[in-house]
Amino acid sequence: MEAVKTVILLTLMTLLMVWVGGIFGGVDGMLIALLIAAVMNFFSYFYSDKLVLAHYNAVEVDEHSAPGLIAIVQRLAHKAGLPMPKVYIIPEPIPNAFATGRNPSHAAVAVTEGLLNLLDD
């Protein structure tokens, strides 16, 4: 269902861009807008997770650098029947966490240091 929502959203944004391109540039504007939308959709789909993680200066961790966090994420992924995502820590004092990625095979979970400090050992 999420894939359908993603396709609908990207299609609607593309149609809006093409419509605006048509208003300002006629057929040529529509073609340019379609090309721009196609490039944007490609990068949004394949690289948005990397952009978000880079924006927050997230650092990927493993069993050696964050064994407790990795154990929690492994347990949750196993219970949900999902593959193990990549795990990141964000150097922020505010408690927060999010998941990103285009599908379960390309997923990442990011947790702030503030949230880690609230967890019991």
Image (tube, helix red, strand yellow):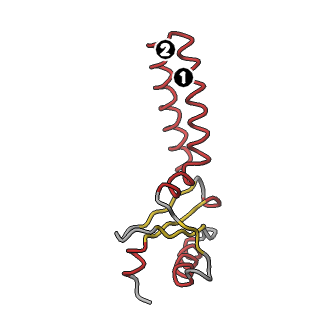
Determine crowd level at label 1: few under 14, some 14-19, many 20+ residues with C-alpha closer than 10 A: many
Which residue lies most toward the bottom here?
121
Q: Residue at x 56, y 56 (%)?
A: 101
| First in residue order: circle 1 vs circle 2 | 2
Residue 2, position in %: x, y? 52, 50
User: In terms of secondary structure, where does tag 2 sit?
Assistant: helix
* Residue under label 2: 22
Is 58 or 20 nearer to us in this picture?
58
Residue 101 position (above or below residue 73): above
Is 16 or 46 nearer to us in this picture?
46
The image quadrant that residue 59 belongs to is bottom right
Residue 96, position in %: x, y? 38, 67
User: In terms of secondary structure, where does tag 1 sit?
Assistant: helix
Q: Residue at x 57, y 54 (%)?
A: 50
Q: Residue at x 51, y 64 (%)?
A: 58
Residue 61, position in %: x, y? 58, 73
Amino acid marked by disc 1? Ala
Real-space Cα distance between discs 1 and 2? 8 Å
Mark 1 touching mark 2, by CB under 8 A? yes
The answer to whether 79 appears left or right of 117 in the picture is right
* Residue under label 1: 33
Residue 112, position in %: x, y? 43, 70
Determine crowd level at label 2: few under 14, some 14-19, many 20+ residues with C-alpha closer than 10 A: some
Q: Residue at x 55, y 30 (%)?
A: 37
